[in-house]
Image (cartoon, rainbow, N blue to C red):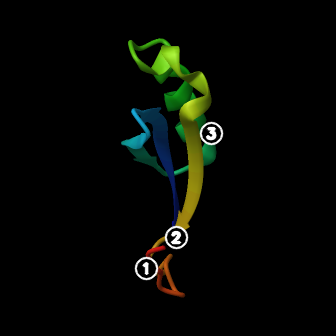
Amino acid sequence: MNEVYLLHHIRLIEGHEDVKLLGVFSSRELAERAKERALNLPGFKDSPDGFSVDKYIIDRMGWTAGYRTV
C-alpha cells in the first residue's frame, strides 16, 4: 500500500476554519463509510457539506512549491 485517504471536516466559525481530521484510511471506500457514520454525530450532522476525502501518497511531499502569506 502506498496511498492513504484522509477524512477531514471543515466548517467556518466566526470567519475562521475549524478543521478536524477524522481519520486516515487504507481505501476511499473505508473513508466514505466513516463519513457516513460521522454524519449521524452531533456537530457533523449540522454541517454535512464540510467533509472531504483526499488521497495522499505515502513518502511523497505534498507542498512542493512552498507558500506565500498575502
Neighbourhood count class around disc 3 (C-alpha, 10 Å): few under 14, some 14–19, many 20 upward: few
Q: Is residue 36 above or below residue 66?
A: above
Position in image of residue 16 (x %, y %): 40, 43
Position in image of residue 56 (x %, y %): 53, 65
In the rendered picture of this protein, how many numbered marks are placed on residues?
3
Nearer mark to the viewer, of 1 and 2: 1
Residue that mark 2 sits on: 2
Is 22 left, or right, of 27 in this rendering?
A: left
Q: Secondary structure at mark 3?
A: helix
The residue drawn where x is 58% and y is 23% is: 48
Q: Is residue 58 above or below residue 13?
A: below
Q: Is residue 40 above or below residue 58?
A: above
Q: State if disc 2 and disc 1 touch (CB < 8 Å).
A: yes
The residue drawn where x is 56% and y is 36% is: 51
Neighbourhood count class around disc 1 (C-alpha, 10 Å): few under 14, some 14–19, many 20 upward: few
Q: Secondary structure at mark 1?
A: loop
Instruction: Report, in whole angstroms, how far the alpha carbon at label 1 lies from the one at label 3.
Output: 22 Å
Q: Secondary structure at mark 2?
A: loop
The residue drawn where x is 53% and y is 22% is: 47
For marks 3 and 2, the one nearer the N-term is 2
Position in image of residue 18 (x %, y %): 38, 39
Position in image of residue 29 (x %, y %): 62, 39
Residue that mark 1 sits on: 59
Amino acid residing under circle 3:
Glu
Is 41 left, or right, of 39 in this rendering?
A: left
Is 27 left, or right, of 60 in this rendering?
A: right
Q: Which one is in front, 48 or 1? A: 48
Instruction: Report, in whole angstroms, how far the alpha carbon at label 1 lies from the one at label 2.
Output: 8 Å
Q: Which mark is residue 29?
A: 3
Amino acid residing under circle 2:
Asn
For marks 1 and 3, the one nearer the N-term is 3
